[in-house]
Image (cartoon, grey):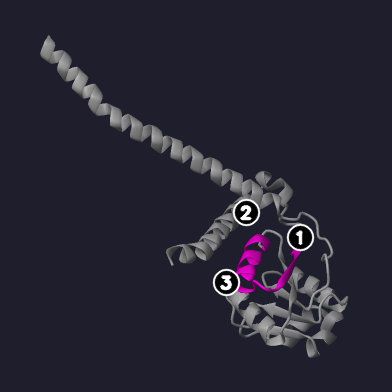
Amino acid sequence: MHSVGQGSAAGSAGTRPWRRVYRWTLLILVLAVLLFAGGFWWFVRQMPVVEAAPSRNADGIVVLTGGALRISDALELLASGHGQRLLISGVNRMTRPYEIARLVPEHQRWFSCCVDLDHSATNTIGNAIETRRWVEERRFKSLIVVTANYHMPRAMAELEHELPGVALVPYAVVSDRIRIENWWDNPSTARLLILEYLKYIVARSRMVLPHSVA
């Protein structure tokens, strides 16, 4: 009887470390889920749901391609005097200025004097790098950033990283097809926002980790 009791006690003691590991693992997973959910809530809450005029004028305007509305809105800003010059970043290598101008006939005249096309950028990181080169070449000190509202947080993060000394003014383009205020009712919008949030986390991590390692 005495030996059986000792065996049971030893077995019970052996399982205790595993129970602690299980509890700590479960706690970490719960905290990670809460942190992700809280970050996602903040991420979505900062996205504009209606378009608003820029808070100020700037030296230049950059529009990150991805939709016809973005280019049209950027040209409207240029025509109304919000900036001196416009960069359209991420244009297909085969696209020429006159092809874009035909899509916005009311603004064709600006292409002959005040619009530049960037054919190099293929993603948001590339947009930021090419925009930095364009801004530095013209010695601009302020910039209006035009892109979709769901893309704005990541775009601003990349541009702030490349242009720490330049004042950035966001102009978020809002599409009727993507209703952020009711994202939970639309699976495709929910997927888009979650994917964009994951890309934002990766972008922020990439900016911080190299400095931490160094």
Check residue 173 for magenta coloring: yes
Note whether 9 is above or below 109 in the view shown.
above
Quadrant of the rendering where the N terminus is positioned = top left
- Whole-Å distance between the Cαs marked 1 and 2? 14 Å
Tags 1 and 2 touching, CB below 8 Å: no
- Whole-Å distance between the Cαs marked 3 and 1? 22 Å
Residue bearing mark 1:
174
| In this rendering, position of residue 167 left or right of residue 106 | left
Please report whichever mark, 1 or 2, sits nearer to the chain's N-terminal start: 1
Please report whichever mark, 3 or 2, sits nearer to the chain's N-terminal start: 3
Residue bearing mark 3:
125
Q: Give percent across and percent down for residue 46.
A: 70, 53
For the point 78% across and 73% down, the residue is 74
| In this rendering, position of residue 42 left or right of residue 104 | left
Give the quarter of the image for residue 62. bottom right
For the point 24% across and 24% down, the residue is 13
Residue bearing mark 2:
193
Check disc 3 and give the amino acid type.
Ile
Q: Give percent across and percent down for residue 181.
A: 73, 48
- Whole-Å distance between the Cαs marked 3 and 2? 19 Å
Check disc 2 and give the amino acid type.
Leu
For the point 34% across and 35% down, the residue is 21
Give the quarter of the image for residue 85. bottom right
Disc marking residue 13: none
Q: Give percent across and percent down for residue 64.
A: 68, 72
Check disc 1 and give the amino acid type.
Val
Instruction: Determine the secondary structure under disc 1.
Output: loop
Magenta part of the protein: which range?
Answer: 152-175
